Amino acid sequence: MSDTFTLQELIEQSELIQALNMEFAAVRDRQDLQKVLDEKLKGLFDFHSHFIELIKPDTLTVSMVSDEAENSPFRGWLTEQELRNDELTHNVLTTKEPVVVEVGQDFGEQKRFNFSSGTKINRLIQIRLSVREKAIGIWGICQRQNQNISAGHLRLIRQIANMLSIAVDSILANEEIKRREEEKSKILSFSNAIASASDKYTLGKIIGQQLDTLFNIHEYCIYIISRDEKWRWAFLFDRDTAIAKYPDFKELIELPQDNNDELYQVAKNATDVLLLTAEEYYRLPGTAPYREMGDAINFKGWGCHTIRLAQEDVAVLTFNHNNIHEMKPQLGLFKSICSQLAITASNLLSRDELERRENEKTILLSLSTEIASLKSREDLFTVVNAKIKEIFSITQFGIIKVDEDGKTHSAFMMDLGIPETYQADYEQVAKLKYSVTDSVFQNVMASDEPVVLDVNRLAAEKNPTEYVKFWKRVGFTSLVCFPLKTGGETIGAILLNRGAKPFMSAETHLLKGICAQLSVAVSNILANEKVINQLSEINRYKQQLEDEKVYLQEEIHTANNSADFIGSSPEIKKVLRLINTVAHTDSTVLLLGETGTGKELVARAIHNNSPRKNKLMVKVNCAALPASLIESELFGHERGSFTGALDRRIGKFELAHKGTLFLDEIGELPLEMQAKLLRVLQEKEIERVGGKTTINVDVRIIAATNRDLEKEMDEGRFRSDLFYRLNIFPIILPPLRVRQDDIPLLTSYFIKKFAKKTGKQVEATTNNVMLEMMRYSWPGNVRELEHLIERSVLLEMGQVIKQIHLPVPKTASNFQGDSTFQLTTIDDNERQHIFDTLTYCGGRITGAGGAAEILGVPPSTLHSKMKRLGIVRKHVV
């Protein structure tokens, strides 16, 4: 090829340029351009291959047009850094003239080119393609043979390059128009598809199908960002995907996620769509909990994009992709789709907000209607347990109240659902009152928003309150608390526990409305309870007055039919001294002695000489009550607590409040009632049968029995702990047979009493009658003497009792069963005599008035006899 062209060649070139200009003008796509270059230029320049590289903002890429792949000199694409460092490319792009490179070696060694093995390229001609002075690419011609290239050829190449630039620009414009049309079509198709959804479930499925079709995205989730930007929660996702069926997915997806976590911050700070391989994703902070689930679904790539609407972050779209880098060419369309999703999510949120508000109004109206009729804690508990647990998905709740004194707070209502092992612990903690100035309560009261209490942190503080320690013991980790107020005054607080799930702003708004309703309900119930307590107190006092009237009448009757202490024997004087000693105290007294010795008379004497004498002394005969009614008789009962309980009844303990309770025949009390009586004596509080509240009582106990309680304890019929609780101040009443000196005085008193009662003129007894009575053993003691005198007065026709009908001892021939006389051995008689004497002496053996002195034997002799006969001192005062 010569350096100059002949005229004929110039004419041919001119015609060629005109023809090429027409050909280039008719080009519409890359295939047309490839055909023109191959058919029109190959013969002109005798090139081995050619290529066109296009310039993008950050890369230099080929494949606009090129020869067949096996002969293509194109390696791939140059990155921005490689493009900046490529000297050849830089030279081509900075000049309008063709750049000729004489290679002279295997061009396969060149970085940017890739030829078949053995291919030799001797010359490379490159020229810039530009439109309006802006470079759009490079046209390259590769020649194998060494041939001359003239200036004319270079001018021709430049002329063709100008036409080629216009053709390439036209093709690129057509491709951009086509791309945009296709993108618009896809966006429109996407919009039409999601518009057909009737509910969120269907919408989630449709979006998943569309994303799969358009971008090969297999799983996705749209997280809505809360208004305060503190939380995000899953709003839309396809529930039919593999990840949605993973066992732990539901728990992960349902919990709101904190926007302060590191993973969200990475997504938020990304300037574009974030595309990561699985390995890159797992290197991000906060992704460890998702590794097991990712491995289970063969997770390979993850993408994330923040969806914005009017410059505001409204949602975050995350998705999984098997080849995440395939997404890069489609990011423009993907962002457009995300804009559509932003509008869709916003519309759904607005609809959800309207539904939520309507639902909130319905809930509050329903709750208001139910609360308006509540009168008791039980009714409120039923409503709260059903409503609040369902609405907020909580496991436990509680309401605390500010006490009437305004200085303390205590439990009002609790449903903690704690294990049985902690129940006693809870009851103990719930009974206590706590200062309203404690830090936890103050923190709740000072807030107008729900307060989240970190139980572990509170328990670690110095001197935590008992209820905080209890929360820690039962395993609570966090509680949400909100104050209850009426008229600007704090009356309490509500505590809710639903684990790690936080309260969102919509839930907080509803909770405030419910708390306003609960505040009114709690206030009304407290006021109602106060009125009920006042009415109950009035009724109690009324009932007590009525019962006191009956008991006073009985007391007056008893007083009129009971003698004072009659007698001057040392035994009676000793009893009187003991009465005077204990009467002015509140100590429990245990009266021991045989039947008929006057135990009730002693009990009245103790009461009448005590500070409680202006109150009632209530008597309970434990032996006369059926076992089934003893508890009701002692503690009272509520209406309907058992069959026949038609009204509330006040028990003897309540009736004896501030007074004295005389428990006669205490040894007859059943073991079950002994345990309950012991608890009352220790705690000084009772519960009515069928009742739910405890009642404090202040009662002095006087108990009496004719049984040997120590023997009863040994045989398991009487509780030892109750015995020691009662045996604080025992008084032993002597039998009539050891105080025979008092028999004449008692006889004279009873004769006068019954003579007056019967209207007879009986005044005394004969000496023989008196001697008979002095010799008689009186097993029935004073009561037996009283009844015999009454009988004798009735039978006597004159003024002097000449005969008294004492029981006749039975002989061995007619002895049957129990009797006042039994056949015994000398040892038995001696044992009984020593025992009676010891009883009379209070167990004292030596000294003045001791048993040895009375029996007339040395103390050592008495000790020997007691040891031989098996006698042990008992009932020592």
Image (spheres, rainbow, N blue to C red):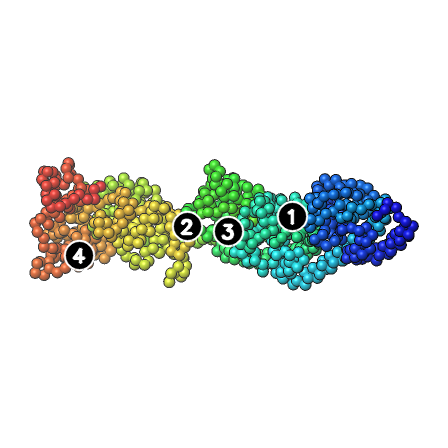
Q: Position of residue 270 (x, y in %)?
A: 66, 45
Q: Which secondary structure lies at badge 1?
A: strand
Q: Residues at badges 4 and 1 in contact (C-beta under 8 Å)? A: no
Q: Which residue is mark 2?
A: 423
- Left or right, residue 325 beside residue 249: right
Q: Quadrant of residue 588?
A: top left
For the residues labelled 2 and 3, the Cα–Cα distance comes to 16 Å
In this picture, residue 346 sits left or right of residue 464: right
Q: Please name the residue shown 70% across and 52% down the image.
A: 329
Callout 2 touching callout 3 (CB < 8 Å): no
Q: Earlier in the sequence, mark 2 or mark 3?
A: 3
The image position of residue 822, as x and y in percent, is 11, 55
Which residue is nearer to you in this view: 165 or 222? 165
Kindly report the distance in space between the C-alpha atoms of the residues bearing marks 3 and 1: 43 Å
Q: Which mark is residue 397?
A: 3
Residue at image position (71%, 49%) is 119
Q: Which residue is mark 4?
A: 792
| Residue type for callout 2 | Gln
Marks 4 and 1, the one that precedes in the sequence = 1
Quadrant, the C terminus: top left
Nearer the observer, 259 or 772:
259
Q: What residue is rendered at 62% in x and 48% in y? A: 276
The crowding category of the residue bearing disc 3, from other C-alpha atoms within 10 Å (few below 14, some 14 to 19, many at least 20), is many
The disc labelled 1 sits on which kind of residue?
A: Leu
The residue indicated by pointer 1 is 274
Residue at left offset 77%, top offset 43%: 101
Whichever of labels 2 and 4 marks the residue nearer the N terminus, that label is: 2
Q: Nearer the viewer, mark 3 or mark 1?
A: 1
C-alpha separation, residue under disc 1 versus residue under disc 2: 53 Å
CA distance for labels 3 and 4: 77 Å
Of marks 2 and 4, the one in the foreground:
2
